Amino acid sequence: MNNSLNLIDDYFSGILTDDEKTAFEKRCLADSAFSKEVATYISLRDALNAHLQQQKKQEFAQLYQQLSIPAKSAKIITFKRIAFLVAACVLLVVGWFAFLQPPSPQKIADKYIATNLNTLGLNMGNSDSLQAGIAAYNSKSYAKAEELFIPLTIKPETAPEAIKYLGLTHLAIKQYEEALKNFDQLSAMPLHTNPGQFYKALTLMARSEGSDNKQAKEILQNIISKNLYGNQEARNWIKSI
Amino acid sequence: MDPVSENLILNGLKSGGLSRLHFEKELYIKFFYLIKEANKKYGIESEEAASIYSDTIIAVIKNINSGKFEGRSSLKTYTYQIFSNKCVDLLRKKTTNQGKLEDTMPYDSLVYELPDNTRSVIQALIAQDERQQIIDRLKEIGDKCKELLLLFEEGYNDKEIAGHMNYQSADVVKTTRLRCLEKLKLRLTRLLHQNE
């Protein structure tokens, strides 16, 4: 662990003594390498704060939509307004069919997979074998990735991650049945943040056969109501299913 | 939805834990009518007023969590004051055509915790255009790391996070958190090297 980082974190957490604080501030002025580290630390923390605020703003924007609806409906409707509303509805319907028809669940899933699951992050905390599996996945050697992930699914220390990645590998090669089994297995695990249900819904949407979308919708509703992993996406997708 | 009392909201926000999210929403609902007032009083469009209102609530939450809100005025007065200031800022920005707020440090940047002379040195080293790049790199450090860093940013301390995310102790959380920060820094450094 970088000692400077520890010290910088202590300073901004407010746990240094007055003397230590003064020494810290003097060092910022005298030691250019240290001052750069402080600047980077602030950049990272500010960016995290900005991201958090963006998330909150999105949540509040949804709340705004919900709270605004009753106020709008309570307005007195005049003939002029009715005429305007009818015209707007006609335009909306035309626009809907022409441009705004919501994408199918399958398209939504494909887009999400292409955007978010084409490349998996190589995490420092993961074991070497997991890293090798992820590297194989990222290079689209899915058979190799599958081969590397399977033995890790029975080791307690790697099981949750390995099962998740194995499911994503099956999803990537459209082996939906296998992927669904993996995500069911993942969902049953007592994890703090469990993406199993979300990936299951994604797999069902990607397959979009028979009652898949109905089942995906139920899962997404559950994700939203319990504020589980993927609830932001679930809120957006559920309108299109 | 019946709005709950100010005290209940304040205690809920201060109590920590996951219920805090619920009280953040309650706070938003409590003074929601301010959006309409901004429309009437300042002639600000509803959507714009809603955005200012969101920023206001975020600032109020942050000030309550950090202890900056000391309860000298009611929550209503405090929220109204911040909201009015933001409305006036927006109008001033529009009339003086100063639309480049994005280039300045955010008002709640950590840099403001430094004394003036140190701040100017550090501020000169901070690249403002990196913020979005850092946010984009967040998805590369793993869900757990991201959650941990965001919980800390939200105002939870290491001990609370340990309880929330099943870590053995606050020390373990701190070590992990700083490793996650280093990971994020590494991703950013790599990107900047690629762009050079």
Image: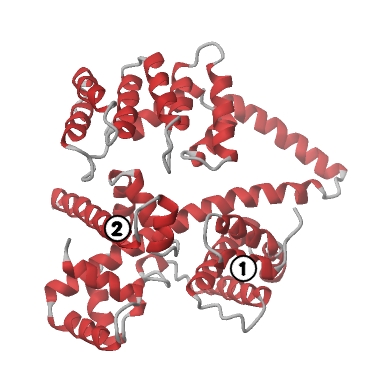
| Residue at (32% x, 44% y) in the render | B139
Image quarter of the C terminus of chain A: top right
| Residue at (18% x, 74% y) in the render | A35
Q: Secondary structure at mark 1?
A: helix
Looking at the picture, how far across and down is residue B94, in whole percent?
52, 69
- Figure coloring: secondary structure
| Residue at (58% x, 54% y) in the render | A60
* Chain under disc 1: B
Mark 1, residue position: B11
- Residue type for callout 2: Val
- Work out whether mark 2 precedes mark 1 in sequence or the reverse, and give the earlier one: 1
Q: Residue A132 falls in which quadrant of the image?
A: top left
Is B16 above or below relative to B68? above
Image quarter of the N terminus of chain A: bottom left
Say which of marks 2 and 1 sits in front.
2
Q: What is the number of callouts on the image? A: 2
Is B31 above or below relative to A14? above
Q: Secondary structure at mark 2?
A: helix
Is A65 above or below relative to B175? above
- Asked if the residues shown at circle 2 and circle 1 are in contact, with their CB atoms under 8 angstroms apart, the answer is no
Mark 2, residue position: B172
